[in-house]
Amino acid sequence: MDAPAAPLHSVRTDFAVVGGGLIGRLVAWRLAGTGARVSLYERGDAQGRDAAAWVAAAMLAPLAEAASAEMLITELGAASLEAWPALLSALPSPVFFQRNGTLVVWHPSDRAESTIFTSRLRVNAPASLLKGGLTTLAGAALDQAEPALGGRFQQGYLLPHEGQLDNRQLLSAVADGLVERGVDLHWNTPVDDDALDALPAAFVIDCRGLGAKRAWNGLRGIRGEVARVHAPGIDLQRPVRLLHPRYPLYIAPKENDLYVIGATEIEGEDMSPISVRSSLELLSAAFSIHPGFGEARILELSTQCRPTLPDHRPQVRLADERTMRVNGLYRHGYMLAPEVSAAAVSCALAHAAGEFSAPDGFEQWSAAARWPALFAREVQAARPSERV
Ligand SMILES: Cc1cc2nc3c(=O)[nH]c(=O)nc-3n(C[C@H](O)[C@H](O)[C@H](O)COP(=O)(O)OP(=O)(O)OC[C@H]3O[C@@H](n4cnc5c(N)ncnc54)[C@H](O)[C@@H]3O)c2cc1C
């Protein structure tokens, strides 16, 4: 059970992080690891049930995502994939993580989708990811790579270097890490826009995902729907993606015969429960990949919205001299979290060290950073007296 919410104003810290979903939790933990005094305010519980991060499949698949994502995202994803093992090893509790690849399959009538898929990868993925990163499999070779699907598909692509982790284990392990590093924790404590300025900290980092919508012009939600099922005996070795012109699907296996099955991207911030039509389509598509899913037990049918910016990129935004925002992780939060959280922490520390005191200090610092494209300064709305 969570401890009761602490009073909003308790200890004065160097950094107050608001929003303890995926990115806020990691930023707070990393900052605390530098010796800084950090507080974290999260409207939900320590498990992370209010976050998009709670529902996510947590596939770490920069090459497969290149079918719809630009080069910056796939490069950030490739660097993050390499960074996950060291990050996980510094956490106090274990997190399921594997790099056993992604398998991409299609039904014979959807063969055209496979050509579109590879041509997009060639455009959007760096050469380092493509080299040795995609193998075409057919017949017995496909059956051997993923015996659970033996005889069900004629062709597929194996992307052998891609990864995945258990999202809920990660959220819980980082929560343990926050306690270990002495972060001043305020679970079940919502902080609205108007209350950010009053937080007792030298610097505030707003990581509220879609909860920051009023403070971030253009931030929107993209709804996703997933089923979590228990399906003993299927034994998929890695996430499987089904290419389909209308109903692309993924099945991500976790430990203990647990599978996260997802498909949809729906524009809008509707957080209502999944519809009958969506659940029928989702589960039928899974059944078409493996009939064993017919006997699976449905543990959850969940919906959440991915916090998304107009360009579908994440951003670390300096809002004013006391506030920074990190948002826009869209469908790639887990895939990008190591690099984006490291970028946000380095920016916060540079601010604390006075590196932005010159008028263009932030611009100079961010131009020299590892990922300059992640950083921006918030454009302040003109006050009424300044408007013409
Ligand atoms: C269905 C689905 C599948 C996904 N699959 C994948 C995947 O396979 N791979 C991948 O990389 N990514 C995936 N994602 C994306 C990933 O979950 C998000 O990119 C990530 O969670 C965004 O992190 P965040 O911290 O910005 O937002 P969130 O995780 O939503 O966290 C924001 C936090 O802020 C808190 N908050 C909001 N308002 C307030 C307030 N006023 N005061 C205090 N706290 C507040 C919320 O309670 C929440 O905990 C998926 C997402 C969905 C929905």
Image: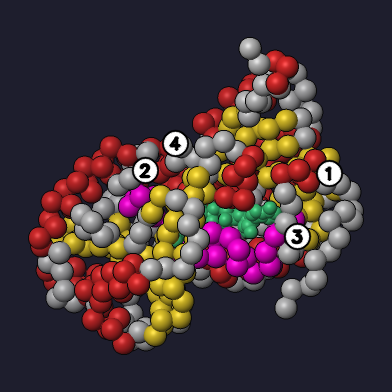
Which quarter of the rendered image does ligand 1 occupy?
Answer: bottom right
Q: Is mark 3 within 8 Å of ligand 1?
A: yes
Q: Determine contact: label 4, label 3, CB under 8 Å.
A: no
Q: CA distance from mark 4 to mark 3?
A: 31 Å
Q: Few, some or many C-alpha atoms within 10 Å of disc 3 (few <14, some 14-19, many ≥20)? A: many
Which residue is at 31% across, 87% downward? 295
Question: Start and end of the magenta stretch?
Answer: 41-66
Residue under numbered circle 4: 311
Residue under numbered circle 2: 69
Residue 281 picture location, percent across and down: 28, 69
Mark 1 or mark 4, earlier in chain = 1
Residue 254 in which image quadrant: bottom left
Q: Nearer the viewer, mark 4 or mark 3?
A: 3
Q: Which mark is residue 47?
A: none
Q: CA distance from mark 2 to mark 4?
A: 10 Å
Q: Is residue 286 visible from the viewing direction of this image?
A: no
Between residue 337 and residue 277, name the one nearer to us: 277
Residue 20 in which image quadrant: bottom right
Q: Which mark is residue 198?
A: 1
Between residue 347 and residue 35, name the one nearer to us: 347
Which residue is at 26% across, 42% downward? 120
Quadrant showing the C terminus: top right
Does residue 206 appear left or right of residue 9 in this picture? Answer: left
Label 4 is placed on what type of residue?
Asp
Q: Nearer the viewer, mark 1 or mark 4?
A: 1
Label 2 is placed on what type of residue?
Ala
Q: CA distance from mark 3 to mark 2?
A: 35 Å
Label 3 is placed on what type of residue?
Thr
Label 1 is placed on what type of residue?
Ala
